[in-house]
């Protein structure tokens, strides 16, 4: 369909995308940070799309560009600190070319973020309820009493016991799991269309982790939000994600459905992530296999394929991985991979070397 519609946000006219297209559309996003040692290429050209009601998992080691991507979408990089190029469309509005005030009006109302550490993300001098009330009143012209009732309802919705009393507690008076729930309540207080969860369960034990993941899944169904889960834990995205983007060295090196990534991964780095993850669904025949080496410097990213120095199969491509950077190419049904190995070589390595050991 080619119909379009306009919408006004605080006096700003927003041109909507044609109906049926992605709600979030990131196109060739690059985020570089100038430093005394050189330019840090934290994100170096990634593209993806996300529809309402769907979940995208972004996975990779620390320093791969996951969190920088999310902060770029939210417009939270310090002014003048980052060089951002490319396009980020949220329901048709290009966030990169929008003014800080225009993005601020969208943040909280149409897009929200659950941060990795809720204790540092929440202000220690104000009660949890005060902070939820403030976030709600920024985008809704209601009294403090109405906003307070809404805050209590949100705390109750995310499973905080005695929400009418806990609303007046400070963040340090909450346990880690309760703080994360409070952060989710704050993020969802204005029913955002896009929710970004950056390592939402890293500091939590497995029981609370499962509860938080169930909560995010249930609230997504209720609000029909588009959700991005950012993590280094493939077990988390296995629970929630419809599609998965694997990042390495600031770039996407594999993209596909959760079924593609777990049942038929095609990149050696993805194999390494799977090989270093314990399994509980079946007995494992081999010890966990760590990925050798360390992540690359984002100032001096290796030429060619960034994963080349750590890849066990780089010798098969005749040296191409040392000189040519592989492009992210579709290998069928939307499954994309950036690798110099031929499809036959990748499939043979997966079927004979990797899969039997998982």
Image: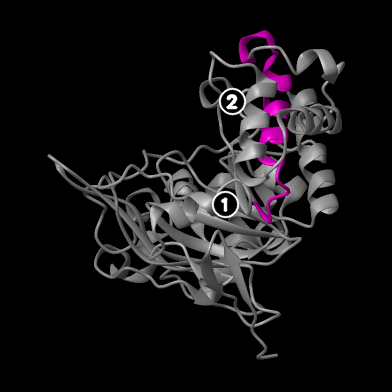
Q: Give the percent coordinates (x, y) of residue 270.
A: 55, 53
Q: Give the percent coordinates (x, y) of residue 227.
A: 67, 53
Image: 290 above or below 17:
above
Pointer 2 local density, CA inside 10 Å: few below 14, some 14–19, many at least 20 = many
Q: Main secondary structure of the magenta part?
A: helix
Image: 65 above or below 44:
above
Q: Residue at x 60, y 76 (%)?
A: 16
User: For mark 1, what is the residue?
Assistant: 58
Q: Residue at x 57, y 58 (%)?
A: 245
Name the mark on residue 21.
Answer: none
User: For mark 2, what is the residue?
Assistant: 118
Depth check: give the residue in front, 53 or 60. 53
Q: Residue at x 54, y 75 (%)?
A: 343
Q: Give the range drawn in magenta.
A: 171-194
Horizontally, residue 30 falls left or right of residue 70, namely: left
Which circle, 1 or 2, is nearer the viewer?
Answer: 2
Horizontally, residue 146 falls left or right of residue 99, namely: right
Q: Does the magenta stretch include residue 102?
A: no
Q: Is residue 177 magenta?
A: yes
Q: Give the percent coordinates (x, y) of residue 357.
A: 66, 46
Q: What element carries label 1?
A: strand
Horizontally, residue 35 falls left or right of residue 30, namely: left
Residue farthest to the bottom, as pictured: 2
Label 1, label 2: how far apart the Cα atoms are: 20 Å
């Amino acid at each position: 369909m080619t119909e379009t519609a306009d919408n006004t946000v605080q006096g700003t006219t927003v041109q909507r995308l044609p109906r049926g297209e992605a709600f979030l559309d990131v196109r060739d996003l690059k985020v570089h940070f100038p430093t005394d040692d050189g330019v840090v290429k934290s994100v170096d050209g990634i593209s993806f799309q996300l529809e309402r009601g769907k979940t995208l998992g972004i996975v990779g080691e620390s320093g791969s560009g996951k969190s920088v991507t999310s902060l770029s979408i939210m417009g939270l990089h310090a002014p003048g600190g980052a060089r951002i190029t490319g396009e980020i469309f949220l329901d048709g509005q290009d966030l990169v070319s929008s003014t800080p005030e225009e993005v601020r009006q969208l943040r909280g109302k149409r897009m929200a973020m659950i941060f990795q550490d809720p204790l540092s993300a929440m202000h220690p001098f104000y009660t949890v309820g005060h902070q939820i009330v403030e976030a709600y009143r920024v985008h809704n012209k209601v009294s403090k009493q109405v906003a307070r009732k809404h805050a209590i309802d949100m705390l109750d919705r995310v499973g905080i016991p005695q929400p009418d009393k806990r609303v007046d507690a400070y963040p340090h008076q909450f346990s880690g799991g309760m703080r994360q729930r409070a952060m989710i309540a704050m993020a969802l207080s204005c029913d955002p269309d896009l929710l970004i969860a950056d390592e939402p369960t890293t500091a939590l034990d497995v029981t609370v982790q499962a509860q938080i993941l169930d909560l995010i899944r249930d609230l997504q169904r209720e609000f029909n939000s588009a959700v991005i889960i950012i993590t280094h834990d493939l077990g988390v995205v296995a629970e929630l994600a419809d599609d998965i983007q694997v990042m390495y060295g600031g770039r996407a090196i594999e993209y596909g459905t959760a079924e593609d990534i777990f049942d038929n991964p095609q990149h050696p780095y993805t194999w390494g992530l799977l090989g270093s993850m314990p399994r509980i669904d079946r007995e494992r025949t081999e010890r966990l296999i760590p990925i050798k080496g360390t992540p690359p410097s984002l100032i001096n990213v290796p030429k060619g394929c960034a994963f080349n120095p750590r890849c066990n199969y780089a010798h098969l491509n005749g040296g191409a991985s040392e000189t040519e950077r592989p492009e992210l190419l579709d290998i069928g049904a939307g499954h994309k991979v950036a690798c110099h190995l031929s499809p036959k070589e990748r499939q043979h390595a997966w079927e004979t070397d990797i899969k039997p050991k998982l």
